[in-house]
Image (cartoon, coloured by chain):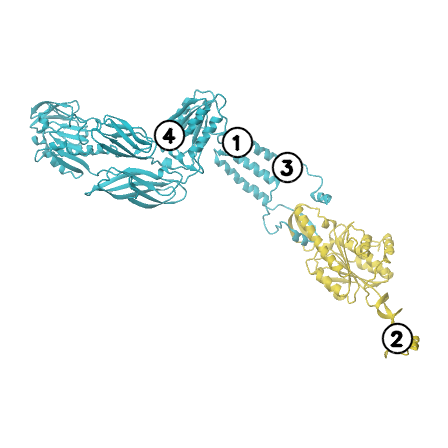
């Protein structure tokens, strides 16, 4: 089937209307006197005395003129035979493997249609010709380097599979064009449905491009955004709200049900019926009460019905563990100023422990630990919780020589604060001028937060994935708690811990993008399970497990066993309006073949010249028909001769 | 006279006039033996004498043999009245020569033969109505007046053949030979009127006069057909299908006329304006199985 690069040329077909009008309008007739019109009226075949129109008959000139017009209109619309152009000696085949290529078109998906076109391009390679294959997913992937063996090329094409990712067609095209630029007789075959996720212009410098567009369906609705939040806890469990943005890209309205269910349950926990107007994006809020054990579980959001693309009909989320930041206070002092400051904060869930309990009870791995006198064991890597704030004072630290890798210097009496790191988030919006300290431990650290004339008295001891703040004095031995700066400091630490927690794995991942999963720093390996993963191990470095890009959407579970058992759920989604909008679109590639530098539409085998020549031939025939020599005998005479 | 009847034509007619068959007698005295009783010398039958019978017709020899008076009866001698009805509607003015001219030549031939046979001949002309009725002529002496009556007829006006024939039927009290010369292009109840004429005892002879182009239309394509009588215009696209449909309709019209007169011992003939009148006369006087179309 040819494709039209300039469909507006078909507007020329409107000229058929006046042409046909000329044929159906009454003509000036020869007047003949007959004895009576009675018998003629009886025998009339197309009596038109009272009508301005006559019956349209397929006359030779009319047929010729309409054929000529059709040829011209098709020629102006710049048709090109899909997949039938001549091939160069070196062909780069770029196949779009983005999610929209999974749309089913009749008995085949777009990717299958695209693979057929790719097979066709390989079949048309001249003897000795080479080809390579690039898959245009989220990241361009060279599936097959330059190869002359068509059998291997066909095999590589057969192995191409659609992903559930946004595609980067421009990147793949640029890379492929770069490989072909130095080839003398090269051609780039771009197989795509035209649904581009990025606005990046398609550029193939110096290489002729033949676009093979696949797909025609446009009836699709999908979830283009999803988010999950928890409201304030109310004892057991919390109220969870899942936000989904559902968009209808079809031309007809759709009535769908949007449901949310937990990953290990079939029954939905929330459902809403939504009427989707054509082209409209409709936000849907699904609220439900999460149970006390539901925190961290995966949520599956679905829209009902079947349409062109199935992958965007499902999105995934995670039940938030709690809306309030878990904070553990560990200290043995009665009337601790730090504990009092934390207890006054309604946005946290405070857990109070003694110093002896701190390393024995189970602590939320995402908790902020505030200790008076206790430092994380063995540095910061194996400590419970996530972030730490340590006030050095009475307790184990009094006899220690270091804390979280920071060595202690000598104790100083009545130190005077001379400077503090105003750029650090923990010391934002506060002043320490006039602060009186009774005594403090100096710290040997290059990441000072507070300095006195005698040395550093507060420092950062953080490691990757964990914020550790060491304050070298007991607030009770200063007038700091009486100042607003103490409250601000405590609040800054809490908010940074909250932000740190939010930057963890709670945010859903996207297909095609790598995941960064924070784990305990001493953990060396995590096992991943999910779509396409079956307890696959991943190496952890510095408390961060970097998971390669997932090509499939779904709920992924990552678990580890050392230093203690832990797990995290990571939802991965497509949620791409560009991929969900599967309607065919125009596609243009900027080429600079021959150094012309002009922006020319890429095309397949152009046939407009042949069509224009055919149209000219038809019109010449029409001219000949009208101007040919008249026959000597009239039709009536001919009838008499035959009768 | 020279216009309608040339000397050569008259010679041909003289040879044919003896073959004129017997036609319905008019009932008036004439030279033709009738079926009724009359005063001719042709004996018909005897019957018993009744009071009032002419004594001169008593057969005395028969009376002597049977003893009862018997009266001799003889056949009557009657004449034949030939009525020539010409359609003078404007449609008869079509053609070269016109259809009316052709009709007048045929009428002149038939009238001459009748007059030469001492029959009475009358010319009737009508278009929308019957507008000319000549005095019947008899014998050769009546030929000039008869021809003048014919020559004075012109084609004009719209036609209503059924009405004109009906009025002619009312004037023709006595039966005779009733010849209708027309193109019969009339949508009125012509056939019904002709049937009434036949029921009145007339021997019907129908001559359909057509121009050659009416038999074989010589035009094609987009034409505006103007009716010679009504001036109505019918715009048509003439093609083979239209020609065939017209021909079929024309053939059906003549078939209806022929069917009507054959059932009543009459004749129908279709002629063109190019047909020789003598051929038309031969066709009319010939056997009924003879070809009923005379074209040229």
Residue B90 visible to an observer of this rendering: no
Residue A536 visible to an observer of this rendering: yes
Q: Badges 1 and 2: C-beta atoms under 8 Å apart?
A: no
| Residue at which label 2 appears | B71
In the figure, B39 relative to B107: above or below? below
| Residue at which label 1 appears | A608
| Residue at which label 3 appears | A625
Does residue B183 appear to the left or right of A377 in the view shown?
Answer: right
Does residue A428 appear to the left or right of A609 in the view shown?
Answer: left
Q: Position of residue A166 (x, y in %)?
A: 36, 32
| Residue at which label 4 appears | A137
Q: CA distance from mark 1 to mark 3?
A: 25 Å
Q: Earlier in the sequence, mark 3 or mark 4?
A: 4
Circle 1 SS class: helix
In the figure, B86 relative to A82: above or below? below
Q: Earlier in the sequence, mark 1 or mark 3?
A: 1
Q: Position of residue A4 (x, y in %)?
A: 48, 34
Mark 1 chain: A
Circle 2 SS class: strand
For residue A201, what is the image quadrant? top left
Quadrant of image for the C terminus of chain A:
top right
Number of numbered discs: 4
- Asked if badges 2 and 3 are on one and the same chain, I answer no
**Observer-nearest of A168 and A201:** A168
Chain in yellow (letter): B
Q: CA distance from mark 3 to mark 4?
A: 58 Å
Circle 3 SS class: helix
Mark 1 Cα-neighbour bin, 10 Å: few <14, some 14–19, many ≥20? many
Does residue A620 appear to the left or right of B262 in the view shown?
Answer: left
Does residue A501 appear to the left or right of A39 in the view shown?
Answer: left
Mark 4 chain: A
């Amino acid at each position: 089937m040819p494709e039209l690069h300039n469909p507006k040329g078909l507007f020329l077909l409107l000229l058929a209307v006046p042409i046909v009008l000329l044929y159906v309008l009454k003509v000036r007739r020869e007047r003949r006197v007959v004895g009576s019109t009675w018998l003629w009226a009886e025998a009339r075949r197309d009596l038109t005395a009272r009508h301005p129109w006559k019956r349209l008959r397929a006359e030779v000139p009319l047929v010729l003129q309409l054929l000529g017009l059709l040829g011209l209109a098709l020629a102006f619309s710049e048709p090109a035979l899909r997949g039938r152009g001549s091939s160069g000696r070196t062909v780069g085949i770029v196949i779009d493997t983005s999610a929209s290529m999974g749309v089913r078109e009749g008995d085949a998906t777009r990717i299958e249609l695209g693979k057929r076109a790719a097979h066709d391009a390989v079949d048309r390679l001249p003897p000795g010709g080479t080809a390579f294959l690039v898959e245009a997913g989220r990241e361009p992937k060279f599936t097959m380097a330059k190869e002359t063996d068509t059998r291997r090329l066909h095999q590589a094409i057969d192995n191409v599979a659609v992903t559930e990712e946004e595609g980067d067609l421009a990147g793949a095209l640029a890379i492929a064009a770069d490989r072909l630029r130095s080839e003398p007789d090269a051609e780039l075959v771009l197989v795509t449905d035209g649904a581009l996720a990025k606005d990046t212009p398609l550029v193939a410098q110096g290489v002729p491009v033949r676009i093979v567009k696949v797909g025609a369906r446009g009836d699709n609705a999908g979830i283009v955004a999803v988010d999950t939040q928890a409201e304030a806890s109310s004892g057991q469990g919390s109220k969870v709200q899942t936000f989904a943005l559902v968009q209808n890209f079809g031309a007809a309205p759709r009535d769908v049900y949007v449901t949310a269910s937990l990953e290990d349950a079939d029954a939905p926990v929330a459902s809403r019926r939504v009427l989707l107007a054509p082209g409209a994006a409709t936000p849907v809020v699904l609220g439900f009460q999460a149970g006390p054990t539901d925190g961290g579980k995966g949520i599956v959001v679905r829209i009902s019905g079947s349409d062109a693309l199935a992958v965007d009909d499902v999105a995934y989320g995670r039940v938030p563990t709690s809306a309030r930041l878990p904070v553990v206070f560990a200290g043995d002092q009665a009337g601790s100023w730090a504990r009092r400051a934390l207890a006054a904060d309604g946005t946290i869930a405070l857990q109070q422990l003694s110093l002896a309990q701190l390393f024995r009870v189970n602590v939320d791995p995402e908790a902020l630990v505030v200790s008076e006198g206790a430092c994380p064991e063995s540095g910061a890597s194996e400590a419970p919780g996530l972030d730490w704030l340590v006030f050095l004072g009475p307790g184990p630290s009094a006899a220690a020589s270091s804390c979280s890798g920071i060595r202690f210097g000598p104790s100083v009496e009545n130190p005077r604060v001379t400077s503090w790191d105003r750029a650090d988030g923990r010391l934002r919006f506060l002043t320490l001028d006039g602060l009186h300290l009774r005594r403090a431990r100096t710290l040997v650290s290059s990441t000072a937060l507070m300095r006195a004339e005698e040395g550093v008295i507060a420092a950062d001891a953080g490691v990757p994935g964990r914020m550790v703040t060491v304050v070298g004095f007991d607030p009770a031995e200063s007038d700091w708690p009486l100042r607003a700066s103490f409250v601000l400091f405590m609040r800054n630490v809490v908010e940074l811990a909250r932000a740190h927690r939010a930057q963890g794995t709670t945010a859903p991942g996207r297909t095609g993008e790598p995941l960064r999963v924070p784990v305990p720093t001493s953990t060396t390996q995590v096992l991943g399970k999910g779509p396409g993963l079956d307890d696959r191990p991943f190496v952890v470095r510095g408390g961060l497990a970097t998971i390669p890009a997932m090509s499939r959407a779904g709920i992924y579970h990552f678990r580890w066993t050392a230093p203690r058992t832990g797990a995290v759920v990571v939802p991965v989604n497509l949620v791409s309006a560009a991929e969900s909008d599967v309607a065919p679109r125009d596609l243009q590639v900027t080429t600079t073949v021959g150094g012309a530098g002009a922006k020319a539409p890429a095309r397949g085998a152009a046939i407009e010249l042949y069509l224009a020549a055919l149209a000219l031939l038809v019109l010449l025939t029409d001219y000949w028909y009208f101007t040919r020599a008249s026959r000597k005998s009239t039709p009536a005479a001919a009838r008499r001769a035959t009768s | 006279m020279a216009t309608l009847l040339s000397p050569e034509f008259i010679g041909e007619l003289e040879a044919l006039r003896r073959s004129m068959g017997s036609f319905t007698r008019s009932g008036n005295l004439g030279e033709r033996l009738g079926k009724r009783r009359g005063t001719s010398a042709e004996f018909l039958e005897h019957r018993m004498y009744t009071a009032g019978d002419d004594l001169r017709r008593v057969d005395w020899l028969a009376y002597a043999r049977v003893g009862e008076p018997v009266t001799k009866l003889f056949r009557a001698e009657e004449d034949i009245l030939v009525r020539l009805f010409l359609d003078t509607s404007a449609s008869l003015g079509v053609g070269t020569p016109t259809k009316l001219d052709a009709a007048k030549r045929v009428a002149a031939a038939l009238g001459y033969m009748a007059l030469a046979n001492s029959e009475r001949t009358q010319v009737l002309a009508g278009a929308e109505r019957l507008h000319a009725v000549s005095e019947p002529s008899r014998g050769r002496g009546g030929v000039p007046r008869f021809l003048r009556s014919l020559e004075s007829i012109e084609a004009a006006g719209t036609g209503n053949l059924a009405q004109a024939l009906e009025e002619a039927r009312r004037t023709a009290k006595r039966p005779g030979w009733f010849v209708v010369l027309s193109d019969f292009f009339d949508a009125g109840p012509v056939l019904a009127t002709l049937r009434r004429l036949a029921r009145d005892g007339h021997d019907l002879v129908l001559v359909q006069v057509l121009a050659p182009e009416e038999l074989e239309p010589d035009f094609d394509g987009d034409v505006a057909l103007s009716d010679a009588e009504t001036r109505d215009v019918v715009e048509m696209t003439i093609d083979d299908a239209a020609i065939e449909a017209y021909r079929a309709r024309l053939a059906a019209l003549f078939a209806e006329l022929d069917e009507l007169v054959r059932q009543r011992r009459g004749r129908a003939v279709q002629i063109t304006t190019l047909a020789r009148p003598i051929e038309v006369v031969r066709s009319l006087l010939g056997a009924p199985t003879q070809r009923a179309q005379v074209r040229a």
